[in-house]
Amino acid sequence: QVQLVESGGGLVQAGGSLRLSCAASGRTFSGYAMAWFRQAPGKEREFVAAVYWSGGPTYYADSVKGRFTISRDYAKNRVYLQMNSLKPEDTAVYYCAADQAPRVLTMRAAYTHWGQGTQVTVSS
């Protein structure tokens, strides 16, 4: 049974940084796509970043390009989201997601497995 557990959220001032972590367990994730989504109050859950567990290119939403970096640590079975130059509009609950073969990496419905989310609040 796949389990994803996020951590690292918190309150930070605009311009600051946070690193989110997603601990993945329950199976071998080789071939899986791992992603971060976020959901602000009153808004739809939106794609933030994705990477394949086995490596290759990384993918980002336009709104976070150049500020956020997704990475994975094989030894620790973790996926990270380094967030720099944070803005108040980055405030949201951030979710880790995984799927063996998502049809479209940026599509929420393409992912089978989700974590419980971690709150990120950026003050102005």
Image: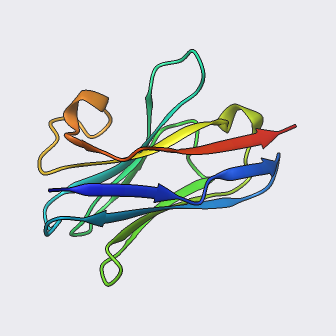
Q: Quadrant of the C terminus?
A: top right
Q: State whether residue 57 is above or below residue 15.
A: below
Q: How many marks?
A: 0
Q: Position of residue 96 (x, y in %)?
A: 39, 49
Is 71 or 65 nearer to us in this picture?
71
The quadrant holding residue 90 is top right
- Which residue in the rendered view is the most extreme toward the bottom? 75
Q: Residue at x 18, y 57 (%)?
A: 32
- Horizontal relation, residue 15 to residue 93: left or right: right
Residue 77 position in % (x across, y down)? 31, 74
On screen, 42 above or below 79? above
Left or right position of 78 against 86: left
Estimate the x, y position of residue 105 in percent, counting from the top left. 27, 40
Q: Residue at x 48, y 38 (%)?
A: 61
- Please identify the quarter of the rendering in which residue 8 is found: bottom right
> Where on the picture, by quarter, is residue 18?
bottom right
Q: Residue furthest right?
A: 124
- Write the residue at 67% across / 36% down: 91
Which quadrant is home to the N terminus? bottom left
- Front position in the image: 47 or 92: 92
**Colour basis:** rainbow
Residue 49 place in picture, x, y as percent = 43, 47
